[in-house]
Amino acid sequence: MSVHLNHKQERVISLTEHFLKNELYYDNTGHDWWHISRVTNIAKKIAIIENADVFICIIASLLHDIADEKISGDEEIGLYRVEHWLKKNEVLNGDIAHILEIISTMSYKGGTNKCTMSTLEGKIVQDADRLDAIGAIGISRVMCYSAVKQRPIHHPELTPRTVITLDDYRNSGTAIMHFYEKLLKLKDLMNTDYAKQLAAGRHEVLEKYLEQFLYEWDGIK
Ligand code: ADP
Ligand code: NI
């Protein structure tokens, strides 16, 4: 298995990494540079296994959170910034269109976005991003994000057994609720075989953690 990247592509990747490191240096919402770096590394690995376009997977991973309203304030502005960056760096028009399409469709949007990715590269970047939301790192990120949003760790009346509406949840969400809202669902949403394998192990970590958490909450174990 080999990666076919030309000199120009390698240069764009390195400039984009630099751009992202600066951009996300002060992020404390779980979208920091290291999230981008982990997603990019896994996407590259899956791209090689799947014989996909490695350049597209790397650049889309590096830029995937720029269009997130949490970072650019507005999705449209974020997408425009991505387009501007890629044009400035003379990425091919076809590649720009592909990268923009991936970034604009992949966001999970709190579970309301059921969009399936239309290209293999899109499926790969989506898998890589979702993998970073589960397992030990996923647990760290949900706690970090909840702290930023001033959400409590847990509330005994807001358990998975409590039927709540999405609005109730938005108003009173807890870190533990987010496991049931999103994290535990991600395993079955993976597109590629490699991501499915990794997700199975990371999902077990979530389940073990929750089990122990609820035991400790009740003072049982
Ligand atoms: P990404 O853009 O990396 O797919 P999100 O922007 O959806 O992820 O969320 C970033 C991190 O914050 C994730 O790890 C996610 O689990 C966590 N997070 C997102 N929404 C919530 C929430 N409502 N409550 C707690 N944690 C959340
Ligand atoms: Ni992300």
Image (tube, rainbow, N blue to C red):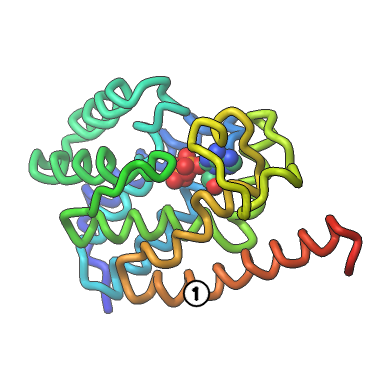
Mark 1 = which residue?
200
Q: Amino acid at mark 1?
A: Ala
Q: Position of residue 152 (x, y in %)?
A: 73, 37
For the question of whether residue 154 can be seen, the reply is: no
Q: Residue at x 41, y 54 (%)?
A: 40
For the question of whether residue 60 can be seen, the reply is: yes
* Closer to us: 160 or 98: 160
* Placement of 169 over or under 126, stated as above or below: above
205 with respect to 85 (left or right): right
Q: Position of residue 213 (x, y in %)?
A: 77, 60
32 with respect to 59 (left or right): right
Image quadrant in which you'd find residue 208 = bottom right
> Element at badge 1?
helix
Local packing at callout 1 (Cα closer than 10 Å; few below 14, some 14-19, many 20+) is some
* Placement of 215 over or under 151, stated as above or below: below
Q: Residue at x 69, y 62 (%)?
A: 210
